[in-house]
Amino acid sequence: MARKIRTFIAVDIPDSIREKIARLQAKLKEKKANVKWVRPQTIHITLKFLGDVEEERIDEIGEAIERAVKGFQPFTAFVGGAGRFPNDRKPRVLWVGVKKGGNALSELADRIENECAQLGFEKGKRKYSAHLTLGRVRSSKNIGSVVEAMNSMEFEGGFFEASEVLIMKSDLKPTGAVYTVLKKIKLQG
């Protein structure tokens, strides 16, 4: 039986932005809400979650991503702002946004979505929204104070150059997900 690996496509961010996100999370953790916080060193921008994929399909997926990014120039993005999915009243996911470069990320995600669909992967049901997940809400305990805190601050993570797309493996551990880069595909324009 073929070994399956939990796989997703992402754009990485620099450690300088991760450090700012870690400081933001530290402030939000003071509110003592029941949130499963994402470890800052693992935060990235997901373009497409593929799920459990047969290991031998990774090369085929890499070729599809190469087709998707053909002619796509590296671009500058700015991480900033914060929000909640689906809304402030009943948030399930806390995130920081992409204020500049979001349209490029959406176009990249659409191209990848279309190429992956040709390989038989299901298309996403929601419109793509570029974001970096800070944490997942486990219960409503103290969540109002987190939302209030997020609404009262202006988060600015900074600029970065998006120059490659990563095919990532996710191993779920009791301590949190461990990510491994399987392939790097350069944006070359």
Image: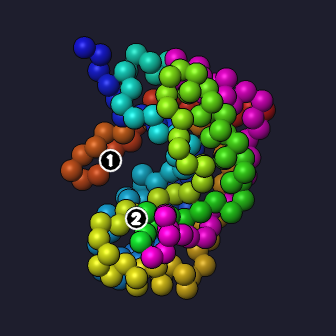
Q: Residue at x 55, y 85 (%)?
A: 152
Q: As rendered, which of 160 and 91 lies closer to the eye? A: 91
> Looking at the picture, does residue 72 appear above or below residue 150?
above
Task: Answer whether residue 164 is visible to the viewer in this image.
Answer: no
Q: As rendered, which of 171 and 103 lies closer to the eye? A: 103
The residue tagged 2 is 92
The location of residue 109, given as percent across then percent down, is: 62, 40
The location of residue 40, given as percent across then percent down, is: 42, 59
The location of residue 88, given as percent across then percent down, is: 48, 75
* Boundaries of the magenta span: 60-89
Few, some or many C-alpha atoms within 10 Å of disc 1 (few <14, some 14-19, many ≥20)?
some
Q: Quadrant of residue 171?
A: top left
Few, some or many C-alpha atoms within 10 Å of disc 2 (few <14, some 14-19, many ≥20)?
some
| Quadrant holding the C terminus | top right
Query: Pointer 1 and pointer 2: residues touching (CB < 8 Å)?
Result: no
Q: Residue at x 32, y 47 (%)?
A: 177
Looking at marks 1 and 2 on the same chain, the residue that comes earlier in the sequence is marked by: 2
> Looking at the picture, does residue 65 appear above or below residue 139?
above
